[in-house]
Image: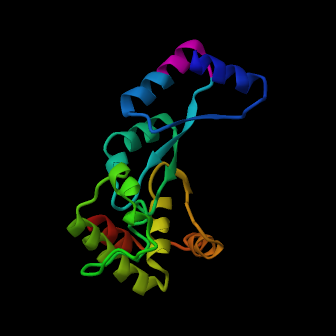
Amino acid sequence: ETLNTLDKFVREGKIRYIAASNFSGWHLMKSLSVSERYGWSRYVGHQVYYSLVGRDYEWELMPLAAEQGVGALVWSPLGWGRLTGKIRRGQPIPETSRLNSKQVTDAGPQVPKEYLYKVVDALDEVAAETGKTVPQVALNWVLRRPTVSTIIIGARTETQLRQNLEGVGWELSADQIAKLDAA
């Protein structure tokens, strides 16, 4: 019923394309199959969580997206604020961070601390090499991944937004990408 209704909206020109959000691989594939069976509009995008510290998307959904031509609309590409450069080994989480909120830490994906620190260390190295900030490097990495069409950033201030926008317009080297992937 949902797919039929969405197809009707496309045919009537009310919307151009349809996308899903946070589907499992089987759910997305089932939806694509139903759309194909009835000749309905199919999902062309899938909103997913993906970052250097949240790479589950790569296991099943990325290969599915590549094979089926579904673009990823990535939410929280900075790993729920963990990849802003503010979280460091041996330092407390800044008071202004949303990660101090129990609601955020309980609801968000868990990241082992040592894993996070290893990724941030690699981001620091690449940031020094490129002259960019840690979040700019993290955003650029996500944008260069297969099937990623766009990212959704959650800047709280105009300054954060402007800084995040500088994560585009330049490219990481193959060695830098390998360094980040290895972390």
167 or 104, which lies in front? 104
Residue at 40% x, 58% y is 51
Residue 63, given in percent of the width and then of the height, sits at 38, 41
Chief SS of the magenta region: helix
Image quarter where the C terminus lies is bottom left
Please give the count of numbered marks on the rendered protein.
0
Q: How is the image coloured?
A: rainbow
127 or 89, which lies in front? 89
Q: Dividing the picture into quarters, in which one does residue 13 lie?
A: top right
Tell me, yes or no, if residue 96 can be seen here: yes
Q: Is residue 44 above or below residue 131?
A: above
Residue 124 placement, left or right of 170: left
Q: Residue furthest right?
A: 13
123 or 99, which lies in front? 99
Q: Is residue 35 magenta?
A: yes
Q: Is residue 95 magenta?
A: no
Tell me, yes or no, if residue 172 can be seen here: no
Residue at 41% x, 27% y is 27
Residue 108 placement, left or right of 69: left
Residue 111 placement, left or right of 159: left
Residue 181, given in percent of the width and then of the height, sits at 31, 64
Q: Which residues are drawn in magenta?
A: 33-40
Q: Dividing the picture into quarters, in which one does residue 80 lie?
A: bottom left
Image quarter where the N terminus lies is top right
Residue 65, given in percent of the width and then of the height, sits at 45, 39
Residue at 55% x, 20% y is 35
Residue 48, given in percent of the width and then of the height, sits at 46, 45
